[in-house]
Image (spheres, grey):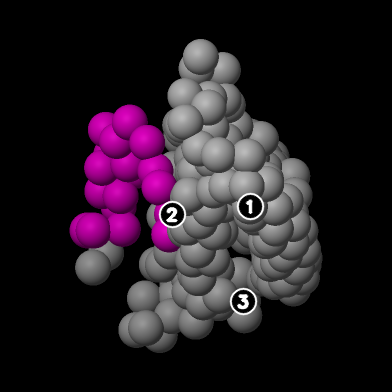
Amino acid sequence: RARGIRHLPAFLQASDNFVALHSPVYFTKLWTVMEFATFLLLRGREHLVIVPEWYPKLQLQLFLIYFLWNLSSASPRQELIAGSRNLDVRSLLRHITLTIMLAILLRISMEATLHLEMLQDELSILTLDSCACAVESDRPLVRRHLVWLSKRANLCEDEACDEEALEKLEYYVKQQIDVVVQGSVGKNGLRYSDIICACSASAFRAMDT
């Protein structure tokens, strides 16, 4: 295990990107925090992506919005063929669908904001000492690695004690996690690009004449 910890930087240095599938217990385990911190300091946050476990669910709801809109839409040719009565029914259906879509989108936004607040609360109480270690005898090895990492990244002076080095590392990692999360899922838990992708097909279809 000690050899694995020593070779971890070389392994992560050879990786192009780091994708963390986040759950509420991710940053409560010392090993995953060590992996994340090591990659962050070696490669930078530009190569880091955090995917919270609730994010795919929001993506699925966005797809549902896209599906509902297309289900109620018809091309201009279809509307010309349909009678005026059918057209009125279809117009009503569109208004109902639009209302449902806006309700779902509002729910998605509120849910994403709630999840982000929970994640920020989780990070606010994150400490290396509180992280669980599957094999407690490995904790001193991991701590020594993190102290070395902090000094190598110039987060503290080489003469700094272990506690100061760990404190500086902990503060830096917590700051960067927040930036990485916003870059991965947006400031509000939903990226504008996701909304555009969900609605672009419908927009192009509406322009089809």
Is 208 drawn above or below residue 123 in the view shown?
above
The label nearer to you, 1 versus 3, is 1
Instruction: Name the residue at 70% across, 58% down.
Output: 96
Q: Which residue is mark 1?
A: 89
The disc, 1 or 3, on the residue closer to the chain's N-terminal end is 1
Residue 134 position, x and y percent, is 37, 83
Residue 194 colored in magenta in the image: no
Q: Residue furthest top?
A: 209
Q: CA distance from mark 1 to mark 3?
A: 63 Å
Name the residue nearer the viewer: 39 or 186: 186
Instruction: Name the residue at 60% across, 70% down.
Output: 128
User: Is residue 63 shown left or right of residue 199?
Assistant: left
Residue 126 position, x and y percent, is 68, 70
Name the residue nearer the viewer: 141 or 16: 16
Q: Which residue is mark 2?
A: 20
Name the residue nearer the viewer: 119 or 31: 119
Disc 2 vs disc 3: Cβ atoms closer than 8 Å?
Answer: no
Quarter in which the N terminus is drawn: bottom left
